[in-house]
Image: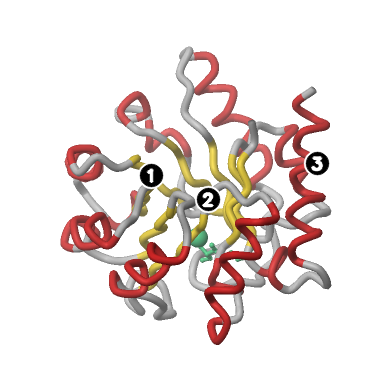
Amino acid sequence: MVKIAPSILSADFSRIGEEIKMVEKAGADLIHIDIMDGHFVPNITFGPDFVKTIRKLTTLPLDVHLMISNPHDFIEKFANAGADWISFHIEASPHPHRLIYQIKNLGKKAGITLNPGTPIHFLNEILKDIDFVLIMSVNPGFGGQEFIPSSLPKIAQLSHWIKGKNLSIPVEVDGGVNINNCEELVRNGADILVSGSGIFHSPDPSETIKKMKKICERIEK
Ligand code: DX5
Ligand code: ZN
């Protein structure tokens, strides 16, 4: 089953409780939370206290995407704040294997994120150890950017590689995902669709989630 993960970066923060309830009711599977430090990416967003607040607003799993330098210093703080899925950028750490097990030992799902310019073969030695892969289809830092087309064959190759190894590691896609390209993404192997502006800036966000889910279900049949 393909999962839909609304990215609350594009939500209305002044009504964050209502926004969370709305996506939950519409059928969202995960809540995607973007953590930016103004160093690894040129933008600053949320810290562990914000994640703690969101934790109180929903029972959906919290998918925390760390776009930060020195991720090892913050993994425990985000885990304690209520994150369920935690991914970090492979470009941000020389010790991805250690970090994966740091996350897993905290009882959380461990993911590795790849920037658009990072090849999938960087995962070669650690693929079997990770719980999910997050493919960035924009350069991280901002919502509302355009999907980078070369991400599509990258997703297809990764999905093919995972299946060929008889592994079941979901491929999550983040950046420029919307109602118009979700079908193609799933056909090319995407298992989890992150969408920020594609959902929250659409005329009817709740309807958009429902439509995206329907499109995905149709492909799965
Ligand atoms: C970008 C973030 C994304 C962002 C996606 O750096 O990682 O999760 O919220 O936003 P859209 O869907 O608007 O491209
Ligand atoms: Zn993200």
Q: Which residue is the extreme one toward the bottom? A: 14
Q: Nearer the viewer, mark 3 or mark 1?
A: 3
> CB atoms at circles 3 and 1 under 8 Å apart?
no
Q: Residue at x 35, y 33 (%)?
A: 130
Coordinates of residue 42 in the picture (x, y in percent): 43, 78
The image quarter in which residue 197 lies: bottom right
The span from disc 3 to disc 1 (Cα, nearest Å) is 28 Å
Coordinates of residue 166 in the picture (x, y in percent): 48, 12
Above or below, 69 relative to 75: below
The span from disc 2 to disc 1 (Cα, nearest Å) is 17 Å
Which amino acid type is shown beneath numbered disc 2? Leu
| Number of residues whose C-alpha sits closer than 10 Å to that of mark 2, classed few (under 14), some (14–19) or many (20 or more) | many
**22 sits left or right of 20 in the view:** right
Coordinates of residue 11 in the picture (x, y in percent): 60, 75
Above or below, 98 relative to 194: above
Label 3, on which residue?
A: 214
Above or below, 57 relative to 14: above
The span from disc 2 to disc 3 (Cα, nearest Å) is 17 Å
Q: Secondary structure at mark 1?
A: strand
**202 sits left or right of 117 in the view:** right
Q: Nearer the viewer, mark 2 or mark 1?
A: 2
Q: How is the image coloured?
A: secondary structure
Which amino acid type is shown beneath numbered disc 3? Lys
Label 2, on which residue?
A: 30
Q: Earlier in the sequence, mark 2 or mark 3?
A: 2
Label 1, on which residue?
A: 112
Q: Quadrant of ligand 1?
A: bottom right
Q: Residue at x 53, y 14 (%)?
A: 164
Q: Secondary structure at mark 2?
A: loop
Which amino acid type is shown beneath numbered disc 1? Ile
Residue 72 bears which disc, if any?
Answer: none
